[in-house]
Every structure is written in C-alpha cells, then in structure tokens.
Image (spheres, helix red, strand yellow):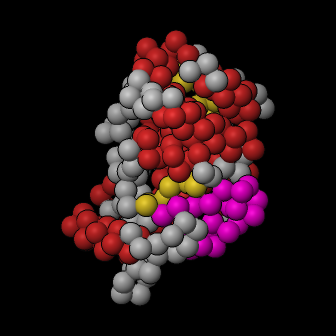
C-alpha cells in the first residue's frame, strides 16, 4: 500500500501563501467569537478553495478511516457528527448538535493552545477547534492542527461515551493539579504524555476484526500517519503506563516513533481515567 497516493488531480489550488494569509484573517474573526458560535469570516465566509479542500481531505480521511479506524469512531463520525461533506461544517450547527447529544460545546480558537489552556477548556466541556484549513501541500498530514484535525479527529470521539468521560478526565485532572500548585510538575508532564499517546495517537485492538485499528484524533485526521501506523506493526506497543512514560512523545512535527495499543475503546478510556486518579 502506497503511503502517498497520487491525488494532485483532485486537489484545489490552495497554496501555502494563501493559506497563511487566510489563517490570519480567519483567526482575527475567531478572536471575537464566543463558544458555540460561528465566526464571521470576511469577505463572505470560507472561500470556494477552502470548502474544496475540506471536501477533498474529508474524502481521503474517511476512505482510509473506514478501513483502519475502529468501528466506534466510524459510528461516532457518521451518526454522531454527521457532517455535510461538501463544505466546512458550520460551527454553531455542529456545536448545537454536539451539545444536544453529549453536553459538550465547540470553542473556536486561533491555533494550538498551551497544555494548561487546552486542558482548562476540556474541564469546562469545551472542545477547542481551529477554524482555518491546511494548504494543498499538506493535504495528507499537517503538524499545525487545523479544522480537519479538530472536526474529524476530536469532535467525533466526544460522541463515544467512554471517550467523552476520558476527555473530561484530562481536563479535570489538569485543573486539580493546577489547584494543588503542580502546574509545572512531573505529574503534569506525565499527563501530557498520556494525552498524546492515547487521545492524539492511540490505537486499539478490535475484537470483531482481530485487527489493530485507530482511535486517536491526530492519527486519524493525518491520513498519511494512519497508513504509516498500520504499515508498521513493529512500532506498536501495549498501552501501559510504563511504556507511555518511557517511549511516549509530545512532538507534533512528524509521525510518532511508537504507537500504543489499548485492549478496547472502553477499556482504554477506563484504564487512563483510573491512572489519572493516581497523579
């Protein structure tokens, strides 16, 4: 299986320079946007090229995810999030659906947050979500979390009850550590390692198929990394605290060196929630 299929003929022309300019414009609008509402993006919302990028990336991500992501994610994406595929989802509509079904809201943000700020939003049931989209040069993997990463990676996971609790658990644990004066501590560092290992890059054994599948937001939305993870089972390690603390990483600049495999989606969440109580 090729890591990078030839897709240039179906991609819109959305180069790095235009994407960077649009990111600045969109982020300016996001700065004045409250939780659960859609930013007013000039001049008249998303450009055709941006919606075309969403359509193209959505097709690739879902095509690969339907083969390599766990069934719980597929159900959450198609029956929970249930996005329109032709245009970047309207945040207010998506947030209202999410809140009605799970209690969570989508919080538009301007880019990657510090771990403390990110976990703080999770503690309040707010899923941070960038509003810009990647350029065509980073079609299949980007180190800069964009709306594809948030809307196709994180938001669907919140429709899985055990993972909704898991996300909240990370926020609540970070808040507790902060209140205890441990905002800069070994425990907070360990929390971040576990978050990346499980929520961003996690894999899980699927008993129905007898195969390892993906559940992590970053590895699913970064389709090239998902193919890499599936093509390199020698990079898979059992999900244990010792393995994560020894081999885990928070590096966002490339593919993970090691991927951690849980026993099941629900067991994975319960395992991490129980561990967080020991910090």
The vertical placement of 241 against 183, above or below, is above
Q: Residue furthest left?
A: 17
- Identify the residue at image location x=57%, y=47%: 122
Residue 153 point in image, percent of width and height: 55, 50
For the magenta stretch, what is the residue range? 87-108
Residue 155 point in image, percent of width and height: 60, 54
Q: Residue furthest front?
A: 180
- Identify the residue at image location x=62%, y=60%: 105
- Identify the residue at image location x=46%, y=72%: 33
Residue 188 point in image, percent of width and height: 45, 28
Residue 256 visible in the shown view: no
Residue 128 within the segment the image draws in magenta: no
140, 221: nearer the viewer: 221
Snapshot quadrant of residue 67:
top right
221, 183: nearer the viewer: 183
The vertical placement of 162 against 231, above or below, is below
């Amino acid at each position: 299986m090729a890591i990078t299929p030839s897709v240039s003929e179906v991609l819109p022309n959305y180069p790095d320079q235009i994407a960077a300019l649009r990111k600045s414009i969109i982020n300016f609008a996001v700065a004045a946007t409250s939780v659960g509402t859609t930013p007013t993006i000039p001049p008249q919302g998303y450009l055709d090229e941006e919606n075309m990028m969403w359509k193209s990336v959505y097709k690739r991500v879902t095509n690969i995810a339907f083969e390599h992501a766990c069934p719980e994610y597929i159900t959450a994406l198609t029956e929970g999030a249930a996005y329109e595929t032709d245009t970047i989802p309207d945040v207010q509509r998506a947030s209202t659906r999410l809140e009605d079904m799970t209690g969570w809201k989508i919080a538009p943000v301007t880019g990657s947050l510090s771990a403390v700020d990110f976990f703080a939003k999770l503690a309040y049931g707010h899923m941070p979500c960038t509003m810009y989209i990647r350029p065509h040069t980073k079609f299949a993997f980007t180190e800069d979390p964009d709306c594809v990463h948030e809307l196709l990676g994180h938001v669907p996971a919140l429709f899985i009850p055990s993972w909704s609790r898991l996300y909240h658990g990370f926020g609540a644990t970070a808040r507790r550590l902060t209140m205890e004066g441990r905002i800069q501590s070994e425990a907070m560092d360990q929390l971040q390692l576990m978050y990346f290992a499980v929520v961003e890059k996690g894999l899980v054994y699927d008993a129905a198929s007898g195969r390892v599948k993906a559940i992590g937001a970053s590895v699913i939305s970064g389709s090239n990394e998902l193919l890499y993870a599936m093509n390199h089972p020698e990079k898979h390690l059992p999900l244990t605290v010792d393995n994560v603390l020894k081999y885990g990483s928070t590096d966002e600049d490339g593919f993970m060196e090691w991927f951690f495999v849980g026993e099941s989606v629900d067991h994975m969440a319960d395992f991490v929630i129980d561990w967080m109580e020991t910090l």
